[in-house]
Image (cartoon, rainbow, N blue to C red):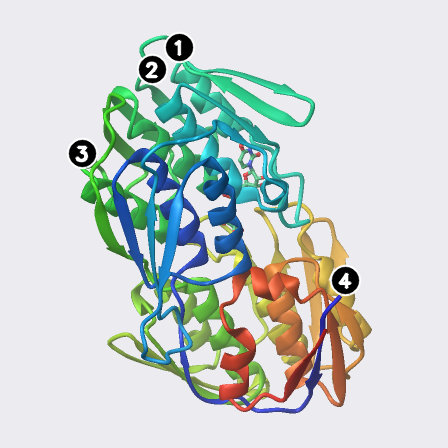
Amino acid sequence: MPHLTIQGETQLNGKVAISGAKNSALPLICAALLTDKVLSLHNFPMLTDTTKLLEILSELGAKATIIADKSGRTGSPQQLEIEFKDIISPLAVHEAVNQMRASILVLGPLLAREGQATITLPGGDAIGARPIDLHLKGLQQMGAQVEIIDGKVISTAPKGGLTGAHIKFPFISVGASEHLMLTAALAKGETILENVALEPEITDLAHLLQKMGVPIEGIGTSTLQIQGKNGVPLTSASHHIIADRIEAASFVIAAIATKGNVTLTHAHPDIIKGFLDILTKNGANIAIDGHQITVSGAPENFNPITIDTAPYPGFATDIQAQLMALLCLVDGKSQINELIFENRFMHATEYQKMGAKIDIQGAKATIHGGAKLHGTDIAASDIRACFGLVIAALAAQGETILRHIYHLDRGYENFEQKFKGLGAVMKRHT
Ligand code: UD1
């Protein structure tokens, strides 16, 4: 399995172009199931997660073309054109389905368009149980019959198709919000979704659906009213995917942890304002200029902090592992309470191998920071943990061997090129 060797005590300096958001691209790709016309997605990130989803859709009949521009930019220079003239199969059982949680987003749109859909139960990162009950309950409220048999979700729409419904989520789920938005777009009549997630990727999806002809009210709030098109395929559309806020936040933390000075280009600072404010308040220097964010700082000038992860606009669980890497280097006692996923501290063990002092008690991690980290042989448990381990490796003394780097390939476009462009010394061994 490929691994990376990373040289420690390296400062990151220079410019890095932020890519299109992975977590936007995945639901946006699924919107292609709702139309028989071409959907164009600009700022499209080439990642194993996005290309695997395209493979899954190709088996269902999608024609996908990637059009590269010649700018040489490392952050999403390409455009995706995808067209689903005819759906050739209602069975989404490609092996990639159970490698990626977001593949569940195929189910509702396929069901709404075809009247039936079967999908292998989706997999994904090892960060908790990650049930799909809210997704399935929402489809049932729209009239679908749903059964789980032999590791597959089998769903059927009633005669006359799915009907709009009033769905109130008992708690916030990004994926269930997106899934039912997509499905509601082709249902008959109005769907009201209450307690919808507020993540910027939800707003991005709502904007695309509007461009495809679906009237939606309440965008940016926790209640959405969606007027479904009653099975009539949506129109074609062209859309620019928002910048990846998690990638941007990851590089911001990396700059501070390595005592560097990094300018992020093609970013959307407004969607990570809360995060940037926390860092500024605690010792980072951050300047914003349009789509650029320039950050400098050092662990010795940073305060220990206590953070709870929360749905947007709270502190993202997807930045928790990277922040932990920084807090290992910051003098004093910090605390992270992981309140979204029940099993998302697996990276702590790897930081401990590097010399960090961290106590885990259930959902609470106490970081006794300021210890010198040293390079060693470590492995990543999920996409974000993998970036966190790169940060720790760059700050540590000596060389680190980082394993399970397929996680980086899943979620960070051109990450080696981007890190090397900032002065990192790393080598991929295959
Ligand atoms: C999305 C993001 C992921 C991020 C997460 C939380 C994508 C592709 N992934 O994941 O990067 O970490 O939001 O911000 O956008 N839950 C249930 N039942 C359900 C659905 C969810 O119990 O039917 C639980 C989950 O186990 C979790 C919590 O709800 O504890 C939030 O999960 P959710 O917001 O759905 O995360 P994802 O959409 O899977």
Q: Secondary structure at mark 4?
A: strand
Q: What residue would you read off at disc 2?
A: 161
Say which residue label 1 marks: 158
Judge left or right: residue 295 versus residue 11: left
Of 92 and 173, nearer the camera is 92
Q: Are marks 1 and 2 in contact (CB under 8 Å)?
A: yes
Report, in whole angstroms, how far the alpha carbon at label 1 lies from the one at label 3.
24 Å
Q: Earlier in the sequence, mark 2 or mark 4?
A: 2
Residue visible at 53% across and 61% down in the picture:
411
**Residue at 68%, 54% in the rendered image:** 364
Separation of marks 2 and 4 at Cα, in angstroms: 52 Å
Q: Are marks 3 and 4 in contact (CB under 8 Å)?
A: no
Q: Which residue is mark 4?
A: 359
Is residue 172 at all visible to an observer of this figure? no
Disc 3/disc 4 C-alpha distance (Å)? 49 Å
Residue 326 in the image: state x and y as whole percent: 60, 75
The circle on residue 215 is 3
Amino acid under disc 2: Gly
**Among the 4 quarters of the image, the one containing residue 7:** bottom right
**SS at circle 3:** loop
Closer to viewer: mark 3 or mark 4: 3
